[in-house]
Amino acid sequence: MGGSGVSLTRADLGTWLINLPRATERRKKMDAQLAGMGLGHQVFDGIDGKAEQKRLAGLIDVPAFERNLGRRVLWGGIGCYCSHLGVWRKFLASDKRVALVLEDDVVFHNDFLVAVDLALANDHLWDMLKLNKIRAKLPICQGRLGGYRINAYLGSATGTGAYLIHRATVERLLPAMLPITRATDHEINRFFHHDFRLFGLEPFPSHVDDGGQSLITGTGFGDVAKFPWYGRLPYYRLKAANYARRGLWLMQKGYLWPRCGRDLLKFGS
């Protein structure tokens, strides 16, 4: 998987912003940031999972979801999940070779476009590349790319605020994303199951900031209904097993050992 070996540019890139139509202030902030960078984009009207619960109910395996996450379903999160799938379908219907997918609470750093251009020019190094995170635990440096590190992750790598993804990666992931049995980023973090290179570009050139007012988890995570500890035992077992599965896949692919001394610009692989 990965790039063709031909350096890509922003002409090969399609950019999609996921935004709930009712989140007008978020849309204004994102439009202003993207216009300031001169980065053209398409807006994907986010799916409001709370409002469309009945329509989305047939897409989710609720017992599996609650067993895997150790909490009740957040329907706003299901809407977010389906929104990413919707963007992926738009991407596949386009002529673009790589997609930049953005959620509407991203804050871009001054080097964001530099990072994107560098990632595109070296797209053979990754299949999906995170440009920010919620969690990025136990990074394993695969080499240096300019002033950045390309990292694999032995721990959980969550958050879908900003990422680059190849057409071939979407084609692999899309059929396997239904029924929904996990949150979006938890399913994507099963790279060992889907067999693709999920890496991060660090230091990340953006971060997320919802001001403590998440449209998914509520104010201060107030909508998250975790089960008591004994009801979360299947989740804890799965979490431990996933460390082993990630480690085994990374070892088999040759990504488990840090190689930060490697100059990826020089060696190109």
Image (cartoon, rainbow, N blue to C red):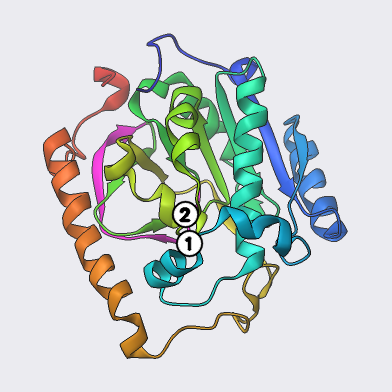
Question: In the drawing, does residue 30 fall left or right of residue 126?
Answer: right
Question: Mark 2: which secondary structure?
Answer: helix
Q: Which mark is residue 145?
A: none
The quadrant of the rendering that contains the N terminus is: top left
- In this orientation, which residue lies closer to the viewer: 207 or 78? 78
Residue 185 is marked as 2
Residue 112 in the image, given as x and y percentages of width and height: 58, 40
- Residue kind at label 1, given as amino acid type: Ile
Q: Name the main secondary structure of what is drawn in magenta.
A: strand
> Which residue is at a point 72% across and 56% down the rendered structure image?
55
Residue 206 in the image: x percent, y percent? 56, 50
Q: Is residue 21 above or below residue 266?
A: below
Query: Reading the chain from its start, which is encountered first: label 1 or label 2?
Result: 1
> Is 91 rendered above or below residue 111?
above
Q: Which residue is labeled 1 in the image?
A: 134
Q: Is residue 240 visible?
A: yes
Question: Which of 223 and 125 lies nearest the eye of the viewer?
Answer: 223
SS at circle 1:
loop
C-alpha gap between disc 1 and disc 2: 10 Å
Q: Amino acid at mark 2?
A: Asp
The stretch in magenta equals 132-145
Q: Residue furthest front?
A: 58
Q: Nearer the viewer, residue 237 or 154?
A: 237
Image quadrant assignment for residue 151? top left
**Are discs 1 and 2 less than 8 Å apart at CB?**
yes
